[in-house]
Image (cartoon, rainbow, N blue to C red):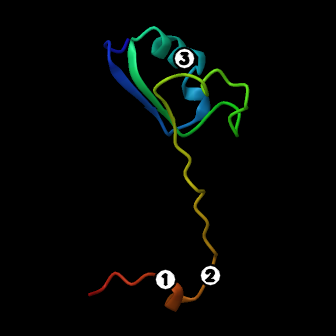
Amino acid sequence: MLPSGAHVVNVARGAVLDEASPVAALEGGRLASANLDVFAHEPLPPDSPLWPTANFLLHRTAPATRTATSSASARPSWTT
């Protein structure tokens, strides 16, 4: 159990956190904020109870993209 006034951050997987729990804890004043980057259903549905909840912060990071290459010259150099 988290102490009163705690901040919750989830950047792992959406299923790690029951999304109804932070809503109830934020509305009840037990959490200071919920900072979420992942959700059980993405994108977060427009009717999610998280949207109107005070102190809910949605963080979206762009997915990393990488082009595969076999060229040694395209690899980063770690020498100085």
12 left or right of 6 in image: right
Q: Are marks 3 and 2 in contact (CB under 8 Å)?
A: no
Residue 30, quarter of picture: top left
SS class, disc 1: loop
Identified by mark 1, the residue type is Arg
Mark 1 vs 3, N-terminal side = 3
Q: Which residue is mark 3?
A: 23
- Label ID, residue 75: 1
Farthest residue, direction bottom: 73
Vertical placement of residue 73 versus 16, above or below: below
On the image, the x and y values in percent for residue 1 come to 38, 11
Mark 2 surroundings: few (<14), some (14-19) or many (≥20) residues within 10 A: few
Question: Residue at the location (60% across, 84% down)?
Answer: 70
Residue 64, picture quadrant: bottom right
Residue at the image point whose x is 51% and y is 18% from the top:
22
Question: Reading the chain from its start, which is encountered first: label 3 or label 2?
Answer: 3
